[in-house]
Image (cartoon, rainbow, N blue to C red):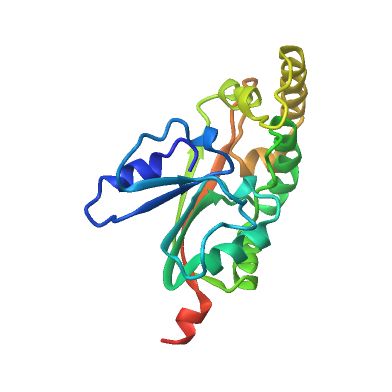
Amino acid sequence: AGIGLVASSLSEKNYTKKIVAYDRNMECMGKLRAHKKISKCDDGDVNHLPFEANHFDVVICRYAFHHFEHKSETLREINRVMKDTGLFLYSDPILPEHSKNIMNPLYHIREDNFHDFLGYFETIELLDKNGLQIFLSRPYKYRYSDFQTFLEGVEDGFLKKPPSKGAVDCLKLKIENSWKQLDPKTKMEMDINTEGKLLGPTYNLVDFAIVKKSSCSNK
């Protein structure tokens, strides 16, 4: 849920009857305004969701999957709580294999709650393993306006134990030095054509509409 942009938007739609906004703690949802259709929940965790099986018509995971450490377990739980005729809406970056192997370690420096971007085929395989199947997809791109904006993610990327200002400055310097040494293939795949100026990355993102494989086999 986070600040609840999706929940807030959906709450204004006539076709929406009820929304459960879920996050690891209630503080994360502090900016989500109260609404009669919205209830908040922070019980359990993404690997042990506090909901009955076949409970939700739609499950939405937007730009959060790279924060989940045990991805297969999370998908298994999503499959469990989603109705047999339900829909899972997934949005996250999809990185080329080479850039993924370069960028993931950099993000581990930048954030303590980061647990890796996935590649395209890796994502499909993981969904399939957990009884889920893509039936619609929409690829698109997002670019950081500049490198400093990307670098500022260090300042709010640590949830467990926020670092001191001195430590933040050291982490920023470490990331900047690594950025300057990115190899040509990563620069090409992430559309980082520096030419003397540090630029933020361009991400290939995807929206997936996903259903249970069992629902497809029954048709």
Q: Quadrant of residue 114?
A: top right
Number of numbered tags placed on the structure image? 0
Closer-to-camera residue (167/84)? 84
**Left or right of 212: which side holds 183?**
right
Q: Is residue 192 above or below residue 88?
A: above
Tell whether 155 sits left or right of 170. left
Residue sitting farthest toward the bottom? 218
Residue 9 as seen in the image, left or right of residue 175? left
**Vertical order, 138 against 84 (above or below):** above
**Percent x, y for residue 55?**
45, 66
Most extreme residue toward the top is: 166
**Residue 77, quarter of picture:** bottom right
At x 59% / y 43%, what residue is drawn? 24
Instruction: Residue 16 in the image: state x and y as whole percent.
Output: 29, 55
| Residue 204: percent from left, percent from top | 54, 47
What is the x, y in percent for residue 52? 51, 66
Image point 40% across, 39% down: which residue? 5
Residue 77, compared with residue 180, is above or below; it is: below
- Residue farthest along the left direction in this orientation: 14
Q: Name the quarter where the C terminus is drawn.
A: bottom left
Q: Is residue 168 left or right of residue 49?
A: right
